[in-house]
């Protein structure tokens, strides 16, 4: 049988990205306590409240308003988020799934975002030993997904044609549309029903552990 590959997204696919955000918020709260004396538990609760309320993008501004902090410090807090060593753990069932896949698949990982930040996530999650190819192409519009290059590079690095590769991700545009555009099969990880955009991925699963069976079915006729 010719080689076949499974290529994964990282954030909200192999682990919940919210955990990275909470880890960063905790680091920021500790930094504020050291600099301004506001108890870390108070600022952390305020940041979590903003996140739960759907205000992630304005969480730091809301923190300033609530605790009388200087908004000029926000850029520094963003740097704390980006440079802190995240406290992340790969779920046991995800680790077991990846280990099992190694015997029958070549495995790749493509993750958008600042490469230095994404690299820390991969290291903290202990993902490197599972993958034959890991790529940090950057941000969307600057080389990242859904541009075709990261997908095609992964196929070349893994020694497969796009038709023998399956991409697994949570985002319908960056992941599904990007992979579909180069001829890869696609599996959408969607714990909840997703909005359709006039086309559908090749398969949809609700849990990461459903991926192996779905991928097997997709490559049988490839």
Image (cartoon, rainbow, N blue to C red):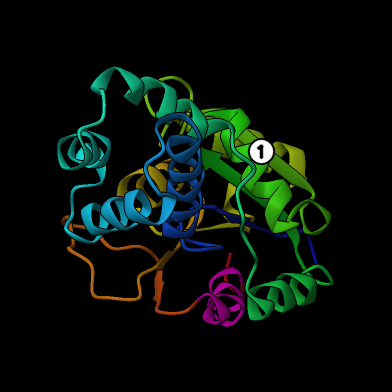
Tell me what residue is drawn at x 57 percent, y 80 percent.
Answer: 209
Picture coordinates of residue 179 (x, y %)? 46, 46
Q: Main secondary structure of the magenta part?
A: helix
Is residue 177 found left or right of 160 in the rendered image? left
Is residue 189 found left or right of 6 in the rendered image? left
Give the quarter of the image for residue 77. top left
Question: Nearest the camera: 25 or 138?
Answer: 25
Tell me what residue is drawn at x 78 percent, y 60 percent.
Answer: 2
Quadrant where the image shows the N terminus: bottom right
Q: Which residues are magenta?
A: 208-219
Q: Is residue 91 above or below residue 121?
A: below
Is 213 colored magenta in this rendering? yes
Classed neighbour count for the residue bearing mark 1: other residues with Cα under 10 Å, few (<14), some (14–19), many (≥20): some
Confirm whether residue 197 shows in the render.
yes
Picture coordinates of residue 54 (x, y %)? 18, 54
Tell me what residue is drawn at x 80 percent, y 49 percent.
Answer: 132
Give the quarter of the image for residue 37. top left
Q: Secondary structure at mark 1?
A: helix
Is 5 colored magenta in this rendering? no
Question: Nearest the camera: 191 or 69?
Answer: 69
Question: Nearest the camera: 211 or 59?
Answer: 59
Give the quarter of the image for residue 212. bottom right
Q: Is residue 169 above or below residue 31?
A: below
Tell me what residue is drawn at x 53 percent, y 81 percent.
Answer: 210
Picture coordinates of residue 21 (x, y %)? 43, 50
Residue, disc 1: 119
Picture coordinates of residue 182 (x, y %)? 48, 40
Confirm whether residue 113 shows in the render.
no
Is residue 213 found left or right of 129 in the rendered image? left
Is residue 162 found left or right of 183 in the rendered image? right
């Amino acid at each position: 049988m010719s080689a076949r590959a499974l290529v994964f997204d990282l954030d909200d696919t192999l682990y919940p990205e919210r955990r990275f955000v909470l880890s960063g918020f905790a680091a920021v709260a500790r930094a504020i306590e050291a600099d301004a004396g506001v108890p870390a538990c108070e600022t952390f609760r305020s940041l979590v409240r903003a996140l739960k309320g759907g205000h992630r993008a304005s969480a730091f501004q809301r923190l300033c308003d609530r605790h009388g902090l200087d908004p000029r410090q926000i850029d520094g807090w963003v740097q704390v988020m980006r440079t802190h060593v995240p406290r992340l753990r790969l779920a046991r069932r995800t680790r077991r799934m990846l280990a099992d896949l190694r015997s029958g698949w070549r495995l790749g990982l493509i993750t958008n975002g600042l490469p230095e930040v994404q690299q820390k996530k991969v290291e903290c999650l202990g993902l490197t030993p599972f993958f034959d190819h890991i790529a940090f192409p950057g941000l969307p519009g600057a080389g990242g997904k859904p541009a075709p290059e990261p997908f095609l590079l992964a196929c070349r690095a893994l020694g497969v044609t796009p038709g023998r590769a399956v991409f697994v991700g949570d985002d319908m545009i960056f992941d599904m549309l990007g992979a579909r555009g180069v001829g890869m099969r696609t599996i959408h990880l969607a714990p909840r029903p997703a909005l359709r955009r006039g086309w559908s991925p090749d398969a949809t699963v609700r849990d990461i552990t459903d991926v192996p069976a779905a991928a097997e079915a997709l490559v049988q006729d490839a």
